[in-house]
Image (cartoon, rainbow, N blue to C red):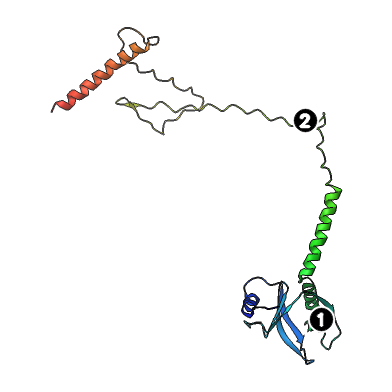
Amino acid sequence: MKLNERSLAFYATCDAPVDNAGFLYKKGGRHATYHRRWFVLRGNMLFYFEDAASREPVGVIILEGCTVELVEAAEEFAFAVRFAGTRARTYVLAAESQAAMEGWVKALSRASFDYLRLVVRELEQQLAAVRGAGSPALPQPQPLSPTLALPSTPALAPPLPRWPSALPPKENGCAVWSTEATLRPGSEPPPPPPRRRASAPHGPLDLAPFARLHECYGQEIRALRGQWLSSRVQP
């Protein structure tokens, strides 16, 4: 497998969240000495650095086709990552505590795509079993007992009439409203003012046709307009 070193270095040190990280003791390949390294697990790749501040990894372990198991070693809390094959290398690592060792063993065992494939297959089998059995029928709603009745909604009371305040005085034919005049409790509202009608020499206009109404009101409008025009002409 050919890997691009620059791409691996960028992936190892990017800002994406990691699956696990911490210090482990790694046994050398040719020597029995252990070196303390900073390990970072991202997906199925286990990177190890000289220390936590390093920007380039020293090496990477591809966690495919491997098994993680506890081993007897000189260091306490040791475990091994074994690969199948006669020439495959076995990586012996040691944690700093029992809890750290258990966390690393669990994370490394679940990092490979083979494990994810098994999980997906198991979920597919469970889904097929649920679909084959069929979903349980939903319970039907029970009718209300005849002795039970929903509480009746109280009738809404009609809104109280809002009486206007005292009639405003008039100045030059225009009403002047004031907030000081209020209606006393218990007093009756004053009667509405009479409607202002135009002068009609021929009697009431309540039942007059529209043409007659237009002519009567139009005479007053024409008279007022003539007065206004004459006042503008006079100096």
On residue 80, the disc is 1
In the displayed structure image, the side of residue 190 where residue 77 appears, left or right: right
Residue at the left extreme?
235
In the rendered structure, which amino acid carries the disc numbered 2? Ala
Vertical arrangement, residue 85 with respect to residue 157, above or below: below
Query: Residue shown at 78%/77% (left/top)?
Result: 100
- Residue drawn 51% across and 25% down? 186
Q: Is residue 185 left or right of residue 5?
A: left
Where residue 55 appears, as percent x and y from the top left, is 62, 81
The mark nearer the N terminus, 1 or 2, is 1
Amino acid type, label 1 = Ala
- Please state the horizontal and vertical placement of residue 149, each as a whole percent of the image: 77, 30
The x and y percentages for residue 98 are 81, 79
The residue drawn where x is 42% and y is 30% is: 181
In the depicted view, which residue is nearer to us: 23 or 233?
Answer: 23
Residue 216 in the image: x percent, y percent?
31, 13
Q: Residues within 10 Å of mark 2 (few under 14, many from 20)?
A: few
